[in-house]
Image: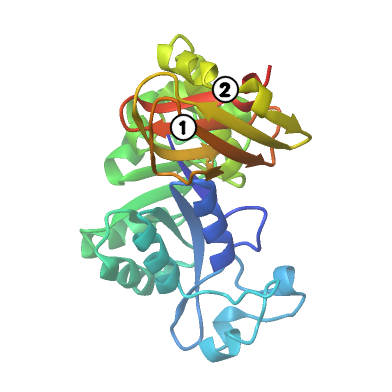
């Protein structure tokens, strides 16, 4: 299941480059963002038309030019152009859900998205009629209905549009048939993640991409806890050289199995520091020391190995 950061992530100022980069650093598959248009026609990324909630200043984006908007700061960050965020996401190979906040901006927003010719971007909105009528002009773009209700006829919704974006509480067993095109919002709780995984849902939008990625990894580990390769990982821990203190830990692994290529080591979706750094060729007998920070009771470490795939295990299970 893909994970998209809602306005980036909750730990940074929303809808800013800093917020989107933080979500990507966590390992999010993409982000959700919102659009507004300045008085001189620039498409920018902001949930609110007025910045008073974020800056304390009564500043209407739609009533000011882009150059005037650049003088505003949200915790030191400027309001970015949609094109700049999409360029960053395309370079990183990420998905972007572009939410249209004002139907009068449809053509401007669609032209920006179309200009990237990248299948990882799509446009969603509460304004269903606008999308349904306008999508024929942009056949290369995917569009999604955004809603917070139970559709009178889900079959009709699915036949009219490419993507379904229901609020998570309205996702029922009926969505199993449409799981591959469903992206619920805003999914922050572990029980919801488990339920949506069981339905086979394509992606979720969340404020806390790091935690949701951890929930997914933990469930993957629970589902395949009989894997012999996970046992090999557990047996690789050098207990005398591994220790945990509070939310920090040093983990030493020694290869007792076979020569392997370590591709990536991460915790809760965020890359972990190691010595030697990965990717690395891990010979039999060699050790690797991994530094972990920000450990919680639900934290999961993932070790991606070319020869055997991705192995996940609860971090605290490694220290016995």
Q: Is 87 placed left or right of 188 in the picture?
A: left
Camera-side residue of 175 and 198 = 198
The residue tagged 1 is 303
**Residue found at the very far top of the displayed protein:** 226
Up-down relation of residue 307 to residue 98 (above or below): above
Residue 172 appearing in the image:
no
The percent position of residue 223, horizontal first and vertical second, equals 47, 15
Camera-side residue of 295 and 78 = 295
Q: Is 89 placed left or right of 208 in the picture?
A: left
Element assignment for label 1: strand
Q: Residues within 10 Å of mark 2 (few under 14, many from 20)?
A: many
The residue tagged 2 is 237
Element assignment for label 2: loop
Camera-side residue of 218 and 157 = 218
Up-down relation of residue 239 to residue 305 (above or below): above
Which quarter of the picture shows residue 69? bottom right
The percent position of residue 294, horizontal first and vertical second, equals 69, 41
């Amino acid at each position: 299941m893909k994970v998209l950061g809602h306005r980036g992530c909750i730990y940074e100022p929303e809808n800013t480059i800093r917020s989107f980069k933080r979500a990507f650093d966590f390992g999010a598959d993409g982000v959700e963002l919102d659009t507004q248009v300045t008085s001189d026609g620039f498409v920018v990324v902001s949930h609110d038309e007025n910045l008073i909630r974020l800056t304390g200043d009564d500043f209407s984006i739609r009533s000011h030019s882009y150059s005037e908007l650049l003088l505003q700061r949200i915790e030191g960050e400027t309001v970015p152009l949609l094109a700049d965020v999409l360029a960053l996401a395309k370079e990183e190979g990420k998905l972007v859900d572009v939410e249209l906040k004002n139907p009068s901006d449809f053509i401007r927003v669609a032209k920006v998205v179309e200009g990237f010719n990248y299948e990882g971007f799509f446009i969603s909105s509460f304004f269903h009629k606008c999308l349904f009528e306008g999508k024929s002009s942009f056949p290369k773009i995917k569009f999604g209905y955004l809603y917070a209700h139970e559709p009178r006829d889900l079959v009709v919704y699915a036949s009219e549009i490419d993507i379904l974006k229901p609020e998570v509480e309205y996702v029922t067993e009926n969505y199993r048939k449409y799981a591959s095109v469903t992206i619920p919002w805003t999914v922050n709780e572990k029980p919801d993640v488990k339920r949506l995984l069981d339905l086979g849902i394509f992606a979720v939008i969340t404020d806390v991409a790091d935690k949701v990625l951890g929930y997914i990894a933990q469930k993957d580990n629970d589902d395949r806890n009989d894997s012999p390769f996970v046992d090999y990982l557990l047996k690789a821990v050098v207990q005398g050289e591994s220790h945990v203190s509070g939310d920090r830990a040093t983990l030493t692994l020694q290869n007792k199995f076979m020569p392997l290529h370590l591709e990536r080591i991460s915790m809760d979706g965020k890359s972990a520091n190691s010595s030697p750094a990965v990717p690395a060729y891990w010979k039999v007998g060699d050790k690797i020391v991994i530094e972990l920070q920000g450990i919680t009771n639900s934290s999961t470490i993932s070790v991606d190995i070319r020869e055997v795939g991705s192995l996940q295990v609860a971090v605290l299970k490694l220290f016995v």
